[in-house]
Image (spheres, rainbow, N blue to C red):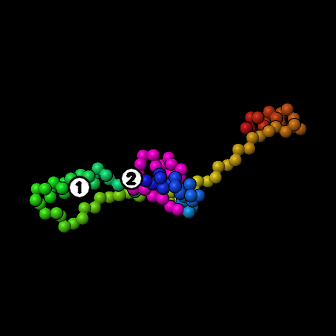
């Protein structure tokens, strides 16, 4: 869903994260490769399912539901889409060295070696 949100925001001319911050809830393996990279909550889905099945089996067996809430750890993975990381530095422009026509042959050779 967050990929669709990124796409819709781009289509609407909104900048992520300058105008809108976006965070997903599943930390897809390719989230770090999106542009901008997608911030995510890493949710322990396997453990969540295991706890749910255990609670269901207890309920089927007639056991009382626990009085406390089961809490599993989640982790916030901060990437570019939420604005939590500083923006990367702008790339330095490449300027080719063009030997000067007035340079001596030795100076032109030195310029070639330096580039």
Question: Residue 97: image x %, image y %?
Answer: 77, 40
Give the tally of numbered discs. 2
Question: Residue 103: image x %, image y %?
Answer: 87, 37
Q: Residue at position x 56%, y 58% from top?
A: 12
Can you name the residue that lies furthest to the right here? 102
Is residue 23 visible in the rendered structure shown here?
yes
Residue 101 relative to residue 21: left or right: right
In the image, residue 49 lies in the stretch drawn in magenta:
no
Which label belongs to residue 27? none
Q: Residue at position x 76%, y 34% from top?
A: 112
The region drawn magenta spans 20-39
Question: Residue 64: image x %, image y %?
Answer: 13, 63
Q: Residue at position x 15%, y 54% from top?
A: 57
Question: Residue 114: image x %, image y %?
Answer: 74, 38
Sequence-first tag of 2 and 1: 2
Disc 1 on helix, strand or loop? helix
35 w.r.t. 86: above or below: above
- The residue that disc 1 covers is 52
Is residue 15 visible in the rendered structure shown here?
no
Residue 5 relative to residue 71: left or right: right
In the image, residue 35 lies in the stretch drawn in magenta:
yes
Q: Which of 92 and 102 is in front in this view?
A: 92
- The residue that disc 2 covers is 26
């Amino acid at each position: 869903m967050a990929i669709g949100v990124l796409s819709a925001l781009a289509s609407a001319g909104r900048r992520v994260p300058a105008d809108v911050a976006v965070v997903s809830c599943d930390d897809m393996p390719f989230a770090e490769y999106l542009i901008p990279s997608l911030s995510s909550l890493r949710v322990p889905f396997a453990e969540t399912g295991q706890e749910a099945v255990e609670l269901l089996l207890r309920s089927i067996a007639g056991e009382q539901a626990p009085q406390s809430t089961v809490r599993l750890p989640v982790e916030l993975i901060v990437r570019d889409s939420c604005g939590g990381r500083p923006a990367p530095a702008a790339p330095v422009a490449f300027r080719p060295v063009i030997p000067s026509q007035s340079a001596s042959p030795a100076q032109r050779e030195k310029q070639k070696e330096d580039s």
